[in-house]
Image (cartoon, rainbow, N blue to C red):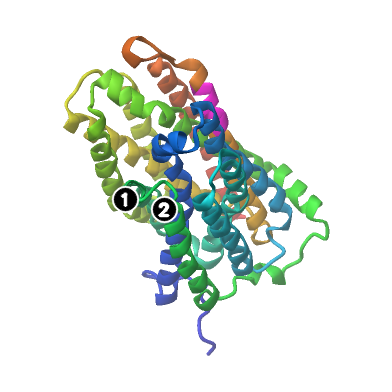
Amino acid sequence: MAPPTPSAPAAAGFSPYQKFVVGLLALLQFAVILDFMLMAPLGALIMPALAITPKQFGLVVSAYAFSAGVSGFVTAGFADRFDRKKLLLFFYAGFLLGTLWCGLAPTFELLLAARVFTGVFGGVIGSVVLAIATDLFDISLRGRVMGLIQTAFAASQVLGLPMGLFLSNRWDWHAPFIVLAGLGLAGLAVIWMKLKPVDAHLGKPQEHSPFMHLWHTLTEPRHLTAFLTVTLLATGGFMLMPFSSAFLVHNIGIDLAHLPTIYFFTGICTIVFGPMIGKAADKVGKFKVFLFGSAVSIAMVVLYTHLGPVPLWAVILVNVVMFVGIFSRMIPFQALSSQVPEPTRRGAYNAISSSIQQVSGGVASVVAGHIVTSGANGRIEHFPEVGYVVVGTTLVGVWLVSLINKQLQASAAA
């Protein structure tokens, strides 16, 4: 009897190799997310060091997101033509080079170019990670896989941001990027030596034209529903994030020094609940958990955006429950949507989805900026209206995910 392949589903849990792959993919997500998130807290150091204005710094931050979005879309046509391991090695190496460039940039112009370069490579890594996870894990395990991978976002807050701030205060703002690039070389070596080829999709018929592969993936009706859902889910998250810190300080009355405490406890709880949400999605049902997460998100977003002066512990509790709701939508949706594309289009599908998410996030931030205003003493006005928009997009998202779930059930029955 032939030995089981790395992609063989485990009945009760992960095989040793699958555990290694999940850990590796989570670390890659951690590195990419941390690189993106580092810019915001370092702004107070970067702006005076490079003598740039807030407008110029905003351009540096948004340059990554928009270049990542364009890169994901452009590479989608080629995403299924290579061994996914080789694709991951190429883009991760480029991402590390861009991160090092950020750590060495002495001027605004070079830093801006470095962020564009980093976004071109970093924006594709997430889609390759999801394609590998879909290829190597059976649907019965995929909720747990997505739950573990998504904890990287929380871990970057709990572990990465404090460490980044410590390094920048100990030396200067270049240090976190240089250290991240140096540690990333070890990850690159592990991928090269330990990760097995992920090329089962290459044995199936492929379209000859990369452009037509992109076009057919983009225009497939089943894919369009999922892409629209990604747009709405990303819009909801990115509308609240840019103004949350100012809202907590100026509207609720939280001291600026206590903001790290809120993010720390939120991150810790998300790390704990993320894998639990993934397990629940596999056992109870992905759509049921998504409905639960949507209901919790709606309730907590309305409560959060209407908060007045309350104690710190109350803010932490509301924030934790809200993020549990958000992750209870995100994790089961990713597991559910991973069933939508066929194996020969997974790379392109995930690249387009990642691109849409990046661009939608940028657009959502701009829209939110046109809704809210800054009142007396920095108070954020019209924040509840932003919450209502998020509730609306969540409700439409529930309807779209119900359509996706029905389509998947019909395909399974057929």
Proximity of marks 1 and 2: CB atoms separated by less than 8 Å:
yes
Quarter of the figure with the C terminus: bottom right
Q: Amino acid at mark 1?
A: Arg
**Residue at 57% over, 29% down:** 363
Q: Position of residue 308 (x, y in %)?
A: 25, 18
As drawn, 299 above or below 7: above
Magenta residues? 362-368
As drawn, 32 above or below 48: below
As drawn, 147 above or below 218: below
Seen as rendered, the residue at the extreme top is 376
Q: Position of residue 151 (x, y in %)?
A: 37, 52
Seen as rendered, the residue at the extreme right is 208
Q: Amino acid at mark 2?
A: Ala
Question: Rounded to the nearest whole Å, what is the CA distance between mark 1 and mark 2?
Answer: 9 Å
Label 1 neighbour load within 10 Å: few <14, some 14-19, many 20+: few
Magenta stretch prevailing secondary structure: helix
Q: Please, what secondary structure does the residue beneath circle 1 have?
A: helix
User: Residue 142, can we see it?
Assistant: no
Label 2 neighbour load within 10 Å: few <14, some 14-19, many 20+: many
**Residue at 41% over, 40% down:** 42
Q: Is residue 213 magenta?
A: no
Q: Position of residue 208 (x, y in %)?
A: 83, 60
Q: Please, what secondary structure does the residue beneath circle 2 have?
A: helix
Foreground pick, 91 / 277 = 91
- The residue labelled by disc 2 is 175
Count of number-bearing discs: 2
Foreground pick, 377 / 343 = 377
As drawn, 58 above or below 81: above
Q: Which mark is residue 170?
A: 1
Q: Position of residue 94 (x, y in %)?
A: 60, 59
